[in-house]
Image: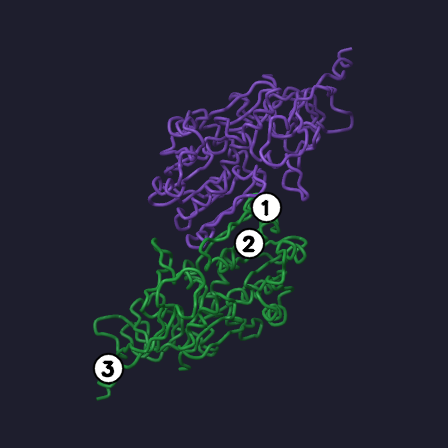
Chain colours: A green, B purple
Amino acid sequence: MAEKREEAAVENKKVVLKHYITGFPKESDVELVTTGTVRLKVPEGTTAVLVKNLYLSCDPYMRSRMTKHDEPSYVPDFIPGEAITGYGVAKVLNSNHPNFNEGDYVWGITGWEEYSLISSTERLIKIKYTDVPLSYYTGLLGMPGFTAYIGFFEICKPKKGEYVFISAASGAVGQLVGQFAKLMGCYVVGSAGSDEKVNLLKDKFGFDDAFNYKQESDLNAALKRRFPEGIDIYFENVGGAMLDAVLPNMRIHGRIAACGMISQYNLEKPEGVRNLIFLIIKRIRFEGFIVFDHHDKYPEFLEFTVAHIKDGTIAYVEDVVEGLENAPSALVGLFFGRNVGKQLVVVAND
Amino acid sequence: MAEKREEAAVENKKVVLKHYITGFPKESDVELVTTGTVRLKVPEGTTAVLVKNLYLSCDPYMRSRMTKHDEPSYVPDFIPGEAITGYGVAKVLNSNHPNFNEGDYVWGITGWEEYSLISSTERLIKIKYTDVPLSYYTGLLGMPGFTAYIGFFEICKPKKGEYVFISAASGAVGQLVGQFAKLMGCYVVGSAGSDEKVNLLKDKFGFDDAFNYKQESDLNAALKRRFPEGIDIYFENVGGAMLDAVLPNMRIHGRIAACGMISQYNLEKPEGVRNLIFLIIKRIRFEGFIVFDHHDKYPEFLEFTVAHIKDGTIAYVEDVVEGLENAPSALVGLFFGRNVGKQLVVVAND
């Protein structure tokens, strides 16, 4: 009787993209659907894992998946009508996979729904430290945090005393890059889109300086004032006009880690960047990266970051939305800069 | 009496920039001046070198020096009315410097004039191999050749079998990059601005394919046809629209060596490059470089290249103009693509 009950299909609310979009997303492009059901048991003969989703991550790269692409990108386009997929934290309810057992907490690629049957488990990681908030695995200890670590240490190759600039600096990635840079003994300035975020950068994350880019009529001058000696490292999260303003302010042998270009994601035609000649004049290395090329370094990152969380030398700010029904507005809000800190959605607390 | 004659001042024709310019240079912006004189002896108490100039090099980077800059670039602006400076090959007539003796042949930074008194000798190199044409030290064995070597081997880090694209491929740098790439076992395509240059790439330099970019209405499609598998290495000499077309055609973990952006040098406002998001999608390293950061590798380059010249595995095409009086048109012609191969000016044959 007990087994029978486990196998019964239960309701499974999910969040879906209604249709492919161009331009800025609207909340009405994404909707909660309550018609689906799921069996809480993994099909026989598979190595799938059945999870209950706890926390879902809203990440800028997801915008690209909302538009139809003729040629495949590094992440597939969403399929309208099916649950959105993305990073999340979940609890294993049932598993045929040798690495995952009932009761395990995992993070990785899951669905925007209450329960997910995960067949592609190569992007699923069993959570080692459960004595920190599990939501951290959508941010600080998950993909965005690991992105900050790889981008800063592996791509930027910082040296003590260098001048570091970070755009979208209060976001999930930026806030951590700034703190890593401070730990390295760098001088760190961040830009963000509101005074509240700017205060967070200075007061909470220990940035040496920060500015609200929306209040600056001349980004080049804004950077020159804050970096009279120039910028050694630019951690690029936004692209477009900010990148164009940064380029002439770079120092010789500077490095730009291209992590994201969120200012461009909703434009029908990206802005043109005109100052690329400074790559030559200043001998700059401008390097794009994607964190999952570096997965072998995750354990190293995890130990480093957990230690800093536990000794209080790394702070972290989340923007938490409760309930799957609020996931559409949380996702869309990201592209209007409405979030303050890492945007995540709570589906269930355990 | 002999010494007295040596010390007599002789006429010294020189080529000067008349005034700073914007936009495309005109021949009338540069002129031959015949009023100067020079003593053919180094002043007592200096370590200067007095040389007779033989060959002068016309190089794209010189365009930047023809415009007044508020902030210093990596090369100073020309001084109107004074002899233009640049790379050249010369014979030492008199020297107080321990490294240079009368009769030595040297290459490095000299003046666009018949005789130059060179006080800054740190950019002067004594020519080791004089059994090759000395004019080669303005190109193949000088700054452009060394630029090709550093840019290709050090910045692009090529692997056998990779797909290589070179713009301005018949120029002093491009023709050599293509041949280095063929020696490495790469697949090599070049673009150039005339059918004559395209034929040179295929017939003389052994490129696998080449095209006239002026005949292509859709550069993206032109590249896709020639690189159905994509481009691993782009050797960037032109910037602008070509760069924008290359970016979506790059392969994962591709490399772009930013050597020059000649298509932009004469524009009041550079073109905007819109496809930089592909740096992230394809995890591309886009790196600017300047050859004089790498001067310790010159001996290695020289041995490598001289060996290939002597065994006939590297070809070289020069566009030779005779006489200082023709230097203004040679220099200006570079920015209209009038040269076929390395542009140089013969001042004297010995």
Q: Which residue is the site of mark 3?
A: A7
Q: Are marks 2 and 1 on the same chain?
A: yes
- Quarter-wise, where is residue A39 in the image? bottom left
Q: Which residue is the site of mark 2?
A: A243
- Amino acid at the residue labelled 3: Glu
Looking at marks 2 and 3 on the same chain, the residue that comes earlier in the sequence is marked by: 3
Residue A10 is situated, as x and y percent measured from the top left of the image, at 28, 82
Residue at mark 1 to residue at mark 3: CA–CA distance: 63 Å
Tell me if label 2 and label 1 are in contact, CB under 8 Å: no
User: Disc number at residue A33?
Assistant: none
Looking at marks 2 and 1 on the same chain, the residue that comes earlier in the sequence is marked by: 2
User: Measuring 57% from the left and 22% from the top, which residue is drawn there?
Assistant: B345
Please state which of the two labelled residues, at mark 2 or mark 3, is closer to the viewer.
2
Q: Which residue is the site of mark 1?
A: A282
- Amino acid at the residue labelled 2: Leu
Residue at mark 2 to residue at mark 3: CA–CA distance: 54 Å
